[in-house]
Image (cartoon, coloured by chain):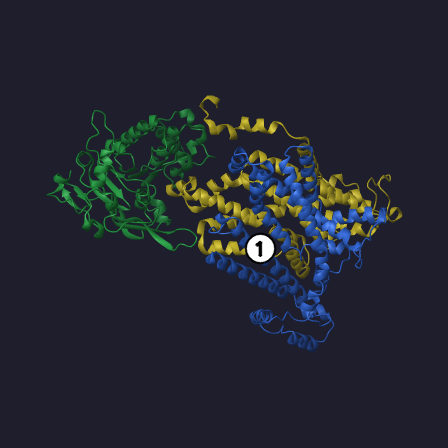
């Protein structure tokens, strides 16, 4: 077990390092930030000063080491526009994003899993068919279409809810629903097939043959076993709590991480983009790690196998 | 006398792990085996499952590289596994697998597959290759109209004929058959064994025949080596070895074969647990199951020594002088 | 071929039996196939089908609603014909998704085979790449790359080509290892075949059906990804147009001219839905082992 955990930890660290390298390479190789930020007509000496200030005049590998060193000491640099610490800019947007993604996650779990399990237990019924169709619709409709259609119906047609902005709890309803739709579909479908697979296993038949009550068979044998694959999907959803709202925040002008990313990307604000990429990756890696370890606990068979 | 194949002191160790917390435990699958195979000779290797006989077969072909010892084929040392020289040598040494369905590509017709060694080793022209495939199919007893069949459309015995035809396509000097009939119906086993014997006599190739089935080995082989937990415990000419086994393990194996018209008195029944390569007993690996084991057997690994004309055995209790007494 | 000589396992993959299993096609799947066929035809014959040039402006007929004579699906804010732009968008989006799916399948399968052949360090490297992909949501990674390198068609297709590669890599590696352990691949290696021959002539044809099934999973996801990026203004750039790009620009006129956005949105939905339906059905028919 110790071996498994430490190997998995090592992989997680390597992954974060890879993302850091990726962020560095993309942002530094894509062009000279000094030229972009200062414009073409600025005198050479000002450009040189700017490059010296930001360490852009050093060889790439020195910049890379300095960058790694700074991040390890918690220094994510200053926003190239405005000069505020990038980390602060990013962290102050986190609550707004979570205000959308956490309710959305609860919707996904609260609707998706029960719908899937119910459909599996009433296989081939009308409700089962309905769940399948809605689930497929749910994750084939792109979020920007879903969001705009909801705005068209609830804001423009019925004037029931605001079409965008931030402030009251009503503002969060449409974006949260938009985010959750795809996940509900995915979870419903996944829990349905996981349940169906488990229900076909010999131990379920054995339990019912022994005379265990149907409810107890489902609760005691089927659900815990179906939980194993579902945990993976849920872990992925938890990991994308920060990253999963880019498009939706843009549609609803919601001042979260996603909006900040889009704005910083168009401003070429290196430090802020780097900081967001690393935050997203860190959350993702931690949740993937948790899922893998949880998996080990839920299903002892997986412990000794490589995760790939 | 020069040999087709000379294997000396072969060693193959797997690192087995027992359980999540267990330490890596080296498993000596093959432990110091030496063999000789002459041109045109058939050598049987018998033993229970886990005795390392299949691993030994792959080592003789160089498919599994030896971790210790050496294999010489036709006087030349075996090239590194996977190297161009090694691939080239495949034209001269071939294998027949246990499960013919697994050994065949289910998406190619059997004619394509029989032809494959010719394509790989660039033997002959288009026309001669096609003709050769026809000859091979006839030789192994397949009908010409079956050429365009797929493996799953044939019966088990027919599939094994395809594998044999493919193995013989490049006219090899040596053939290693790893349990070639144990996956087949009993009714078909004899046909395939007879086919192998006929082909071996026609082509004069050297054959290593690995099996747990003593009857088949006795029937087919010139010489036999008996393996137990990675080591050869007895070796000798087939008829003599079966008629007069010297090692207690061989005696137990031979007496376990029922023979019509022979009473069951005096059978040596094997006791104790079947051999586990991960937990190799000290001294003579067979001692926990041996009814004659003494102190020396528990402490010292017996070496193979001559016990008569062309015969060897690895047992402390078997010497040339005492050989008859033990039996 | 006669049934008499076919043993039990044969029935499943013989042409006749295969046809029999395909004969009953559910209505939804049939609809999906018909829609996809229509989309492919539109993409191929876009130049002929388009009533107007996609950049031709008719300033007298700006924001005409659908049904206007000459503009069946209406016009946009510059008086450009929505139907013509839609036809061109279908072509662009399908070409991107198709190209990217192929790149992704080739890239992933190659890495999977390399991992299976060399194990050790190569395998660790591939696992690390997959970990990286799992850690950084694809949309976020693409945003960063496209924003800083600028969007071009080549870059967009290339980038999308990294979508879903790990799925192919995992399948290809797993199947290659199991084929090489004791199966037909090991037997062919034993015949003296080069690794190249073993992988291209034997393993690839055997895993192809599984890989194609995975492509039906990746394809709609790439369409969604491309349209999302185009919607955000980072995908296909004007004057060219794609489905997501049309929705993105149509969004400005949601209140006054919703048809600009609804027409491409409907096409995206119907297309991804059709591929999902057909893909699911194909998966059940061809490959009962993966879900």
- In percent of width and height, residue C246 lies at 76, 49
Q: Nearer the viewer, residue A296 or C4?
A: A296
- Tell me the quarter of the picture where residue C219 sits: top right
Kindly indicate which chain is depicted in blue in the rendered structure: A
At which x and y percent is residue C152? 68, 55
Asked if B121 appears above or below A177 in the picture, the reply is above
Chain letter for the yellow part: C
Residue A281 in sight here: yes
Q: Residue at x 32, y 43 (%)?
A: B50
- Left of C228 or right of it: where is C167? left
Circle 1 residue: A288
For the N terminus of chain B, which image quadrant? Answer: top left
Residue C267 quadrant:
top right
Image location (x, y in percent) of residue B316: 17, 47
User: Dot 1 lies on which element?
Assistant: helix
The residue lying at 20 percent from left, 27 percent from top is B263
Q: Residue furthest right?
A: C60
């Amino acid at each position: 077990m110790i071996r498994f955990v430490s190997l998995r930890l090592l992989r997680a660290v390597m992954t974060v390092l890879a993302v850091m390298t990726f962020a560095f390479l993309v942002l530094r190789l894509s062009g000279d930030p000094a030229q972009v930020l200062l414009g073409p007509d600025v005198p050479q000496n000002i450009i040189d000063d700017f490059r010296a200030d930001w360490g852009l005049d050093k060889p790439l590998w020195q910049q890379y080491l300095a960058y790694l060193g700074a991040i390890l000491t918690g220094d994510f640099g200053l926003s190239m526009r405005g000069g505020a610490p990038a980390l602060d800019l990013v962290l102050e947007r986190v609550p707004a994003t979570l205000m959308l993604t956490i309710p959305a996650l609860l919707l996904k779990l609260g609707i998706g899993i029960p719908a899937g399990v119910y459909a599996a237990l009433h296989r081939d019924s009308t409700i089962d068919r309905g769940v399948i169709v809605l689930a497929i619709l749910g994750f084939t409709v792109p979020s920007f279409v879903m969001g705009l259609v909801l705005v068209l119906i609830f804001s423009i047609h019925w004037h029931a809810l605001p079409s965008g902005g931030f402030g009251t709890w009503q503002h969060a309803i449409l974006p949260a629903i938009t985010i959750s739709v795809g996940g509900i579909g995915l979870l419903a479908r996944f829990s349905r097939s996981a349940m169906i697979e488990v229900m076909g296993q010999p131990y379920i038949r054995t339990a019912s043959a022994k005379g265990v009550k149907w409810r107890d068979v489902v609760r005691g044998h089927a659900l815990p076993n179906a939980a194993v694959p579902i945990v993976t999907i849920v872990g992925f959803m938890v990991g994308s709590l920060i990253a999963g709202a880019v498009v939706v925040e843009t549609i609803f002008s919601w001042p979260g991480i996603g909006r900040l990313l889009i704005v910083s990307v168009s401003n070429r604000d290196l430090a802020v983009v780097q900081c967001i990429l690393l935050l997203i990756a860190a959350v993702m890696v931690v949740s993937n790690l948790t899922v893998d370890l949880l998996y080990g606990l839920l299903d002892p068979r997986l412990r000794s196998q490589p995760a790939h | 006398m020069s040999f087709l194949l000379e294997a000396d002191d072969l060693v193959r160790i797997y690192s087995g792990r027992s359980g999540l917390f267990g330490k890596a435990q080296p498993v000596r699958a093959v432990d110091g085996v030496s063999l000789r195979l002459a041109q045109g000779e058939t050598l049987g290797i018998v033993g229970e499952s886990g005795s390392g006989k299949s691993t030994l077969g792959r080592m003789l072909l160089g498919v599994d590289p030896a971790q210790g010892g050496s294999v010489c084929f036709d006087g030349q040392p075996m090239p590194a596994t996977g190297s161009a020289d090694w691939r080239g040598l495949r034209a001269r040494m071939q294998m027949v697998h246990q499960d013919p369905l697994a050994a065949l590509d289910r998406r190619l017709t059997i004619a394509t597959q029989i032809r494959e060694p010719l394509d790989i080793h660039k033997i002959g022209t288009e026309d001669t290759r096609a003709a050769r495939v026809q000859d091979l199919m006839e030789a192994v007893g397949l009908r010409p109209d079956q050429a365009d069949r797929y493996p799953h459309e044939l019966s088990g015995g027919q599939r094994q004929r395809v594998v044999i035809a493919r193995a013989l396509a490049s006219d090899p000097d040596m053939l290693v058959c790893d349990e070639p009939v144990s996956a087949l119906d009993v009714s078909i086993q004899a046909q395939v064994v007879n086919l192998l014997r006929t082909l071996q006599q026609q082509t004069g190739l050297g054959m290593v025949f690995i099996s747990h089935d003593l009857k088949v080995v006795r029937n087919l082989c010139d010489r036999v080596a008996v393996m137990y937990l990675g080591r050869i415990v007895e070796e000798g000419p087939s008829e003599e070895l079966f008629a007069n086994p010297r090692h207690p393990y061989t005696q137990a194996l031979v007496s376990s074969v029922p023979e019509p018209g022979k009473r069951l008195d005096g059978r040596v029944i094997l006791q104790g647990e079947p051999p586990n390569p991960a937990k190799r007993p000290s001294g003579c690996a067979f001692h926990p199951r041996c009814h004659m084991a003494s102190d020396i057997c528990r402490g010292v690994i017996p070496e193979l020594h001559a016990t008569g004309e062309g015969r060897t055995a690895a047992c402390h209790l078997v010497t040339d002088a005492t050989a008859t007494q033990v039996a | 071929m006669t049934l008499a000589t076919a043993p039990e396992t044969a029935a499943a993959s013989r042409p006749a039996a295969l046809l029999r299993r395909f004969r009953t096609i559910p209505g939804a799947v049939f609809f999906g196939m018909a829609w996809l066929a229509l989309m492919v035809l539109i993409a191929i014959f876009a130049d002929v089908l388009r009533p107007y040039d996609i950049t031709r402006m008719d300033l007298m007929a700006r924001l005409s609603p659908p049904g206007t004579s000459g503009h069946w699906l209406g016009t946009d804010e510059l008086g450009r014909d929505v139907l013509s732009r839609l036809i061109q968008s279908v072509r662009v989006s399908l070409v991107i998704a198709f190209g990217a799916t192929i790149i992704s399948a080739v890239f992933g399968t190659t890495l999977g085979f390399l991992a299976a052949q060399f194990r050790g360090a190569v395998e660790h490297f591939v696992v690390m790449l997959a970990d990286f992909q799992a850690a950084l949501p694809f949309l976020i990674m693409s945003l960063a790359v496209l924003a800083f390198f600028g969007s071009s068609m080549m870059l967009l297709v290339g980038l999308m080509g990294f979508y879903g590669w790990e799925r192919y890599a995992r399948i290809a590696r797993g199947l290659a290892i199991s084929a090489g352990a004791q199966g037909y691949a090991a037997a062919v290696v034993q015949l003296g075949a080069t690794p190249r021959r073993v992988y291209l002539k034997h393993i690839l044809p055997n895993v192809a059906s599984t890989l194609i099934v995975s492509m039906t999973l990746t394809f709609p996801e790439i369409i969604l990804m491309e349209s999302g990026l185009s919607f955000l203004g980072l995908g296909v750039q004007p004057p060219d147009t794609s489905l997501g790009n049309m929705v993105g620009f149509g969004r400005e006129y949601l209140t006054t001219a919703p048809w600009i956005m609804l027409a491409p949105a409907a096409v995206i939905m119907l297309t991804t839905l059709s591929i999902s339906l057909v893909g699911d059905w194909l998966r059940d028919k061809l490959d009962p082992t993966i879900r």
